[in-house]
Image (tube, rainbow, N blue to C red):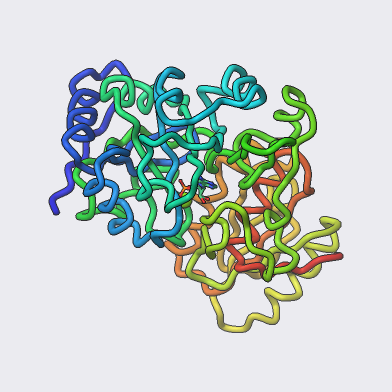
Amino acid sequence: METKILTIQSAEDGAAIAEAAEALKSGKLVIFPTETVYGLGADALNETAVDGIFTAKGRPRDNPLIVHIAHEDQVLDLVSVIPPKGKDCMDIFWPGPLTLIFNRSELVPNYVTAGLDSVAIRMPDHPVARSILQEANIPVVAPSANTSGRPSPTTADHVVEDMMGKVDLIIDGGHTGVGIESTVLDVTVDPPMILRPGGITREDLEAIIGPVDMDETILPSDSSIIPKSPGQKYKHYAPRGEAYVFAGNIIGIAGEINRRVRESGSKKTAVLATTETLELYRGMDLLVNMGSRDNLKEVAHNIFDALRCCDDEGMEVIFIEGFELEGMGVSIMNRLLKAAGGKVILGL
Ligand code: AMP
Ligand code: MG
């Protein structure tokens, strides 16, 4: 398939927006920037188009898709009921990096929800994504635009690496903002439950709707427990090298990572550190700064780029500093633990 790339300077670029919207309406696959990561979009009600997403990504077909919308009215067609706490979340956090799980209506096809009775819906906040969705005026499924299992794309370069020749159109809108995916919140249960941590923290949600539960598989300690969100059971976000995450006191972490770097022999070794700790490391082949420990939004913004950078430089072993399990730290650690396939060194 021939892939066209359009670089867009702003959401006011009417010709590019119209081309993307028209392509979606005619059943084509269109990649566009959202405020979380780049999305691979298709008309949610066109089975052939949606099927193309699973093929392009190599995505397991039991992993349901998130439906993206531009207007709140669209939700009414897609769900059977909007629970009050769901409505409160829509009012406060949409548009933005929060996906809500509702009981679905008859309109939503099985090939979108992987046969579940629920549907995931999000209203993105990126001006380009919003304009395309408004112009197309159809529900659009849009998973992250990476090959399944690889780190999510936060730049058009990442998208091109994975998707060239597999989609019809790529809209290049620069680096995405949040940098990790949306939080997935199930509002069909009370208290609502976070199925995937992301751009909106548990603390943000609890300030609006009171207590929120968290699926126990988000920070896996026991791999035999099955996540409630089908996509969460897969190894994800993985760089090609062997990755390890280190948790505990930062001096302990740095000491242990330096010891392992010394022992790694001829293997090409990377360390993913933070602004505050960069100077503590010695002897590795690549040192990447994920951002400041005082600004976890910056770390979230950089994390997938840091993991892909290790691939670009051919790193065979990757040692990654961990973060405290609060606020955005939970979302970051969820991604890092998956990138490391659960290889975490605790208690340092
Ligand atoms: P992504 O590939 O980044 O768009 O991920 C979509 C996420 O939303 C995956 O983790 C899915 O399992 C999850 N998801 C989508 N629909 C549902 C649903 N109806 N119930 C639970 N999780 C869902
Ligand atoms: Mg994804």
- The x and y percentages for residue 266 are 56, 83
What residue is shown at x 73% (from left), y 68% (from top)? 222
Q: Is residue 193 left or right of residue 110?
A: right
- The x and y percentages for residue 228 are 61, 53
Residue lying farthest to the left in this orientation: 2
Q: Is residue 54 left or right of residue 192?
A: left
What residue is shown at x 38% (from left), y 46% (from top)? 112
What residue is shown at x 53% (from left), y 53% (from top)? 306
Quadrant where the image shows the C terminus: bottom right
* Residue 207 in which image quadrant: top right
Quadrant where the image shows the N terminus: bottom left
Q: How many marks?
A: 0
Q: Nearer the viewer, residue 90 or 166?
A: 90
Depicted 291 relative to depicted 68: above or below? below
Q: Is residue 225 left or right of residue 19?
A: right
Depicted 301 relative to depicted 279: above or below? above
- The x and y percentages for residue 296 are 68, 39
What residue is shown at x 59% (from left), y 55% (from top)? 288
Depicted 15 relative to depicted 139: above or below? above
- The x and y percentages for residue 298 are 62, 38
Q: Nearer the viewer, residue 281 or 32?
A: 32
Q: Nearer the viewer, residue 155 or 20?
A: 20
Depicted 65 relative to depicted 174: above or below? below
